[in-house]
Image (cartoon, helix red, strand yellow):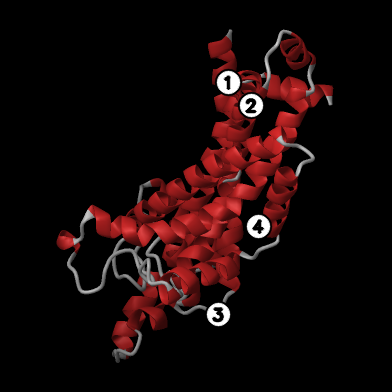
Amino acid sequence: MKNKKFGVFIGKKAIKLIFLLVIVSIASFWLVEQAPIDPVKVYIGAMSITPEQKVILEEYWGVNTPAREKYFNWVGSILKGDLGDSLIYRMPVSDVIKERFTASLALMASAWLLSGILGFILGIAAGMKSGTWIDKAIKTYCYILLATPTFWLALIMLLVFSVYLGWFPIGLGVPLGITNEDVTFLDRMKHLILPAITLSLLGVATIAMFTREKLIEVMSSDYVLFAKARGESGLSLVLRHGVRNVALPAITLQFLGFSELFGGAVLVEQVFSYPGLGRAAVEAGLRSDVPLLLGIVIISTLFVFIGNLIADIIYEFVDPRIKQQEMKT
């Protein structure tokens, strides 16, 4: 029965994904069509071409093709695995996304783990010391983080730790003047640390405040009161009965934050000149690279959907108590 229920669940999610991709693709394509973008001018840049060459390029990019026909041609190419060619990188969009997404994935994964671990620890500490100065300090810290703009925090981190203290590189993903073959793992990590820490700080507050509220709720439950009556107390009580009951809900919330994580990565990558997918999206938008921009929209939609799907699987199957508690409240 569980396998059948899981199969039905995945089937429904797959249908939702198809509808989501259709809606996102139509909306994105329509918005791009409304923009005054000439792909031929973007492609040739400052080069001079003959009128005959311009006609060939216009036919290749479908400048005079009706929007509906152009959309279905684009969708047909995507279904065949062809996302088109990037105008600014002069290479297949799939190759650009693969290269940039690898860098973004390292950044977002590091930030995701750091924010989850730090937020969970702060939430546990605040919940254990509810009402004390420790709890008030952590809540104040979280409120400040929630009100802090992403780009402002990134600029402050860059100025303090890169410009003034010189602890980290000012930007980029690898050192300048070094070929890709000569770049070491330590070089990449050194350029990754500061953007990852900056991005992780933005997700700490949500996890910390959620964990705090859940822990306070758990610690006031009947079975914890019974454990206290048996002589359990202190950190061992929290670890045995508190942490194990708030961990999965916190992980679920962490997966639901994939959209905020990707949105924050766009700004952080731009400030640190980090060569990730978010920076590529900004460049594609500013320089009118329509094929790359649409490809990134599709990939980012899939990325956010997968995060929400994992959260829903935990919510429905891994720990049904989350759903039961919400139904009771």
Q: For numbered disc 4, what is the local secondary structure?
A: helix
Q: Residue 36's mark? A: 3
The reply to whether dot 1 and dot 4 touch (C-beta < 8 Å) is no
For the residue marked with disc 3, what is the amino acid?
Pro
In the image: residue 94, left or right of residue 195: left
Mark 1 and mark 4 lie on one chain; the one further toward the N terminus is: 4
| Residue drawn at x 74%, y 24% as measured from the top left | 219
In the image: residue 18, left or right of residue 45: right
Q: Residue 145's mark? A: 4
Q: Is label 2 or label 4 in front?
A: 4
| Residue drawn at x 55%, y 68% as measured from the top left | 32
User: Would residue 24 be visible to someone looking at this image?
Assistant: no
Q: Which residue is the site of mark 2?
A: 315
Mark 3 and mark 4 lie on one chain; the one further toward the N terminus is: 3
Task: Decide which of 318, 168 is in the foreground and name it.
Answer: 168
Q: Residues within 10 Å of mark 2 (few under 14, many from 20)?
A: some
Q: Is label 1 or label 3 in front?
A: 1
For the residue marked with disc 4, what is the amino acid?
Leu
Q: How far apart are the alpha carbons under marks 3 and 4?
A: 38 Å
The reply to whether dot 1 and dot 2 touch (C-beta < 8 Å) is yes
For the residue marked with disc 1, what is the amino acid?
Val
| Image quadrant occupied by the N terminus | top right
Image: 94 above or below 30: above
| Residue 141 percent across, percent down from the top left | 67, 54
Mark 1 and mark 3 lie on one chain; the one further toward the N terminus is: 3
Task: Decide which of 323, 119 is in the foreground and name it.
Answer: 119
Image: 28 above or below 35: above
